[in-house]
Amino acid sequence: MLRHSSLIPLSHEHQHGLALCVLTERALNADPSPENVAAQARAIVEQFEGELQNHFHIEEEILFPALTGLTDLSGQQS
């Protein structure tokens, strides 16, 4: 099933968030020093504030309420 074109930006943001997790894990495994942990934390906060905070807002305030009452992926209501 193809996703609606309006969901593509959210999908890309999901990919960015997952990539952030993978890259953070790799960076911390390679260098678990306190300085690197702090650098990774700053990068996470920066991405959260720059992209993910709005992403979660859109999901929680727009997308999820619009899906209330749907019982399956076809859009059939209960």
Image (cartoon, rainbow, N blue to C red):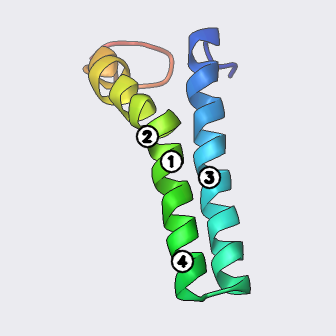
67 left or right, relative to 6:
left
Camera-near label (3 vs 4) is: 4
Q: Nearer the viewer, residue 4 or 29?
A: 29
Instruction: Name the residue beneath numbered marker 3.
Output: 18
Q: Is residue 39 above or below residue 55?
A: below
Q: Give the mark nearer the N terminus: 3 vs 4.
A: 3
Measured Cα–Cα span from mark 3 to mark 2 = 16 Å
| Amino acid on which the number 2 mark rests in the picture | Glu
Instruction: Name the residue beneath numbered marker 2.
Output: 49
Q: Is residue 22 above or below residue 25?
A: above
Residue drawn at point x = 61 percent, y = 12 percent: 4
Mark 3: few/some/many CA within 10 Å (<14, 14-19, 20+)? few
| Amino acid on which the number 4 mark rests in the picture | Val
Residue drawn at point x = 54 percent, y = 77 percent: 37
Measured Cα–Cα span from mark 3 to mark 4 = 18 Å
Q: Nearer the viewer, residue 10 or 48?
A: 48
Camera-near label (3 vs 1) is: 1
Q: Secondary structure at mark 3?
A: helix
Residue 8: x percent and y percent? Answer: 64, 21
Q: Secondary structure at mark 1?
A: helix
Instruction: Name the residue beneath numbered marker 4.
Output: 37
Measured Cα–Cα span from mark 1 to mark 2 = 5 Å
Instruction: Name the residue beneath numbered marker 1.
Output: 46
Residue 51: x percent and y percent? Answer: 51, 34
Q: Nearer the viewer, residue 12 or 68?
A: 12
